[in-house]
Each structure stands twice: as structure tokens, then as C-alpha cells.
Amino acid sequence: MKSFKLDMDLNTAITIIQNIMNDSVSNVQAITFGELSKVFSYNYQGKAFVIHFNRAGERFLKDEYLYKNLSKLGIPIPRIERNGNINDVFFSISEKALGQSLVAYPENEIKKVLPALATEFKKITEIPIDSSGKHGAINHDGEGSFNTWQQYIESFFQKEQDGFWKDWYTLFDQSFLEKEIFDYYYDMMLELSSYAPNEKYLVHGDFHLGNIISDGKDITAIVDWEMATYGDFMFDIANLHFWAPQLEIPQTFYEAWRKNGEEIPHFHERLLCGMLFKGIDALRFFAKKEDRAAYEMIKDKLSTITKK
């Protein structure tokens, strides 16, 4: 099975962090969530910090842009202290939020904070977005690239790409990625994408329990905004539901809207579209990672959600 993370053990991280700080640090611990970055927490001069290491520096510029613009709107996003690079590796240092990722809590404790999460999420959907701007992935200047959300979705899976997904179509021939199955769910997703609203919303893009921090009562931080886009906010709800269906998160969020006398048009169609998007992306990811067990698990999930 392949790993796409930097090859960096704890001792190497300690050395690099102390070189960056030009001082000693303590309580360095690995944070194992995520597939691409190496992440560690540490203490320095009585404060707790988190440092991300990644081969791509663009994501940290984007994080910094979003921190500057979202924190002043009351969105719980940790303060970014410093970005830079060392030994051809990019890093970003931020304050460590109080608490721990929701994924670390037992299910009954997670359910207790879901109303608070729904409140914070609704605040994100209410952030004013320039209607004249574009849809899709946000660059470090806060701009999208596509005229419609549907165009962005199609581009996400187009054959010709650079970066991580360069030459990804070879997976159909050189791995266990099954084109017939991929195309079946892809076509279903595209058909459902017509239900997306014309209005743009800020979409986190990687909204799962590992990126949501809580002290057990409140949501103290929403982290890792590197995949943020302008588009349909239902994709974030879909992401949560795809990975943790037992929590019944869509219903909690739907009720948060209804309590304010609001409806979410085409709720179920947009939810399914977002889940299909996440699912087929996971199919190709786990095929590239050579993780057959995870690939089969995703196939089972896709089969289940489309039969309901």
C-alpha cells in the first residue's frame, strides 16, 4: 500500500521544528489524520501549536487568506502564526485549538455537539460571496475559476490534469479502478448536479470529523481549508454523512434551517450528489494508494446510498 505523506518520523520533526523556532520545544506529538500532510503538535513557551508539513506551499497561502478573512467573521479557525519552507519542505504553524478532533470522541459525545456544529456551519453558509465571482476551487487570492458549479465538478474528474492527479486515467488500466463502475456513479452525480443552486457558498471541501475540533461542548475550530471552494454547501454535509452515516448529521443540519423558518431546496438530491462526488473521488484515491480493502468499502458505500 502506498503512502502520499512526507517521510518524516517524530525525531526528524523535532529537529526541524527546533531549527524553525531556533529554540527547544516540548511535547511533540504526531497527529495522524490526513492523507497528504505530516502534522505534529508541540508546546513552545507555554503555548500549544500545530505544524503542517507539505510538499505544496500553495495550500498554506490559501489557508492564510481564509484565516484572515474568516476569523474576523466569527468563524472558528486557528490563528496562523507563520508559513515558510525549510529543506524544500513547506510548513505552516498555527495555534492549537482547545479540545480534540470530533473523531476522537465516542459517538454519544459527538451527538451532543452536533447542534453546535450545525450553528457554526450555518454561519459559514451565510458568509456573503461576490455574485460576480467564479465557482470552484479557491486560489490564495480568494478567487474561483469556473462559471458554474457543474463545470467545476466536471473539471475535478477530467482526464488531463496536473499535480496529484496527473495521468490518473492510467489507473483504469494499471490498477483495480473499474471504469464501468466509476462511470456509472459519475453519470448519476452529473445528472444530480443540475439541482445545485445558482448562488455560491463557501464550501470547506474536506469537512469530516477529523477536521472539526471540540472541547466536548462547543466547536472550537474548523481546520484544514486547503480544498475550499465556492459552490454548493450541501457537499460539506454530504462529506460528513458519507463517512459517518450513523450520526444522522443531515437531519440535524436540516432542522437547524427549519428552526429559522428556512428550507434547503432539493435537499436530498444535492446531498446524494455530494456523496457521489466524495465516493468516486475516494475510489480513484484508494486505487492510486493500492488499498484494495478501502476501495471495496467505498464501492459498498456507493451501492448502499444509491439504493435508498
Image (cartoon, rainbow, N blue to C red):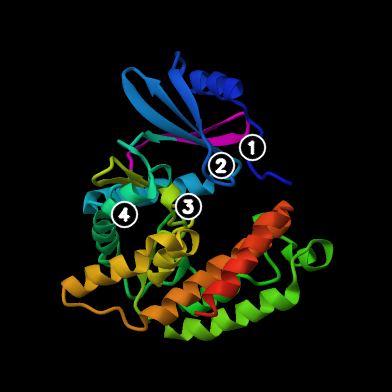
**Residue at mark 1:** 6
For badge 1, the amino acid type reads Leu
Callout 3–callout 2 Cβ contact below 8 Å: no
Task: Please check the rendered image and state whether residue 194 is part of the magenta-colored stretch, yes or no.
Answer: no
Label 2 and label 4: CA atoms lie apart by 28 Å
For badge 2, the amino acid type reads Ser
Q: Tell me which label, 1 or 3, sits earlier in the chain.
A: 1
Q: Tell me which label, 2 or 4, sits earlier in the chain.
A: 2
Q: Is 156 located above or below residue 84 in the figure?
A: below
Please give the range of residues in magenta. Answer: 78-92
5 sits left or right of 240 in the view:
right
Determine whether the residue tagged by mark 1 lies in a helix, strand or loop.
loop
- What predominant SS class does the magenta segment belong to? strand
Q: Residue at x 45, y 13 (%)?
A: 24
**Residue at mark 2:** 37
Query: Which disc is residue 111 wearing?
Result: 4
For badge 4, the amino acid type reads Lys
Q: Tell me which label, 2 or 1, sits earlier in the chain.
A: 1
Category of crowding for the residue at label 1, using alpha-carbon neighbours closer than 10 angstroms: few (below 14), some (14–19), many (at least 20): some
Q: Tell me which label, 3 or 4, sits earlier in the chain.
A: 4
